[in-house]
């Protein structure tokens, strides 16, 4: 039972490094992803990442746009109504980033295999098509023989296939609520955050709210990520912006389009970085960048009632600041 609260800057400094295999969750362009953590990785100059992206978001789009991604394994690479991910497109088309294409069926299966500590997992999807035969790591080998290799079912003798499992060095997972020990509740679609939290070697949570542990005790069946698998907890309100966090805030449609357009060029990317990445250091400054009027609009969400059962356990910013100081003192920082 250790207080695992840590600042965003310290979490990136301590738990990320150049050349690592980094996974982020959840997924979907407007899903609950740890986008604020990705912004801090950009600020600290992380590079040469092997990125695991269940479903492309503005975090992977931004990391690719600044040249931080050497390789990405992705189940989906678009941004749906916002168009193709321009930062990622530019990185792949210039040869800066290798994109290994799987599917929204294959990535969760591979995460499940990693969570179970299996050496591989039987493939039930991605076979008989270019997702099996095209191998970005070996582009001259077509059809690829070992991206999804054939194996024999020992029980029936029939031919089947295999996927390598995913075991990231670090996964940074956005959650709706966490306590200081790393127990977490997620509202909305999970998108394999449950499996990812077990597959990764280290786990950092980015939370909209810090709540009292009594909240977790009241709803133990909703605690999909237990503190035992979590290394650190970062409190960062609106950390998914410009995407949405179910029950807390809606997606910022205007900024989603603007951001993707900006990342299409090096000049637009640099302008975006100056305005929305390098322009703040604290949580308070970050919220000022978004703007009070915009925040009021986004948090006036039809799904806000989903938070009603938990509100009495939410810690105030002042309480969290004291808990962060206590965590620093405990760690000897």
Image (cartoon, helix red, strand yellow):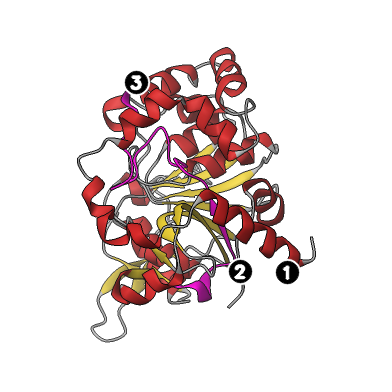
- Which label sits on residue 330? 1
Q: CA–CA distance between discs 3 and 1?
A: 43 Å
Depth-wise, is mark 2 or mark 3 nearer the camera?
2
Q: Is residue 188 visible?
A: no
Residue depicted at 22% across the width and 45% down the height: 303
Residue depicted at 42% across the width and 57% down the height: 314
Q: Earlier in the sequence, mark 2 or mark 3?
A: 2
Query: Local crowd at mark 3 within 10 Å, few (<14), some, or many (≥20)?
Result: few
- Which label sits on residue 254? 3
Query: Local crowd at mark 2 within 10 Å, few (<14), some, or many (≥20)?
Result: some
Q: In the image, is residue 246 part of the stretch drawn in magenta?
A: yes
Callout 2–callout 1 Cβ contact below 8 Å: yes
The residue pinned by badge 2 equals: 3
Magenta stretch in the rendered image: 226-254
Q: Where is residue 241 shown, x and y percent of the image?
A: 42, 35
Residue depicted at 69% across the width and 51% down the height: 10
């Amino acid at each position: 039972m250790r207080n695992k609260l840590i600042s965003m800057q310290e979490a990136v400094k301590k738990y990320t490094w150049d050349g690592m295999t980094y996974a982020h969750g959840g997924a979907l362009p407007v899903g609950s992803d740890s986008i604020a953590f990705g912004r801090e990785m950009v600020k600290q100059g992380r590079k040469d990442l092997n990125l695991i992206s269940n479903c492309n978001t503005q975090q992977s789009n931004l990391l690719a746009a600044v040249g931080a991604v050497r390789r990405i394994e992705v189940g989906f690479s678009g941004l749906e109504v916002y168009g193709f991910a321009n930062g990622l497109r530019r990185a792949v088309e210039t040869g800066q980033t290798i994109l290994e294409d799987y599917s929204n069926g294959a990535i969760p299966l591979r995460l499940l295999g990693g969570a179970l500590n299996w050496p591989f997992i039987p493939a039930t999807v991605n076979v008989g098509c270019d997702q099996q035969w095209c191998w970005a790591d070996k582009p001259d080998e077509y059809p690829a023989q070992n991206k999804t290799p054939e194996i024999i079912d020992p029980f029936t003798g029939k031919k089947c296939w295999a996927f390598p499992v995913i075991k990231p060095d670090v996964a940074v997972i956005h959650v709706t609520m966490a306590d200081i020990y790393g127990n977490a509740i997620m509202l909305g679609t999970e998108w394999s955050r449950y499996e990812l939290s077990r597959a990764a070697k280290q786990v950092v949570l980015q939370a909209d709210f810090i709540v009292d542990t009594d909240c977790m005790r009241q709803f133990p069946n909703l605690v999909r990520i237990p503190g035992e698998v979590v290394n650190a907890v970062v409190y960062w309100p609106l950390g998914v912006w410009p995407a949405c966090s179910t029950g807390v805030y809606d997606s910022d449609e205007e900024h989603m389009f603007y951001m993707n357009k900006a990342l299409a060029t090096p000049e637009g990317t640099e302008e975006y970085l100056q305005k929305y990445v390098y322009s703040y250091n604290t949580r308070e400054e970050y919220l000022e960048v978004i703007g009070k009027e915009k925040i009021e609009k986004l948090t006036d969400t039809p799904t806000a009632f989903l938070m009603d059962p938990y509100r009495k356990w939410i810690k105030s910013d002042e309480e969290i600041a004291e808990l962060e100081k206590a965590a620093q003192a405990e760690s000897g920082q």
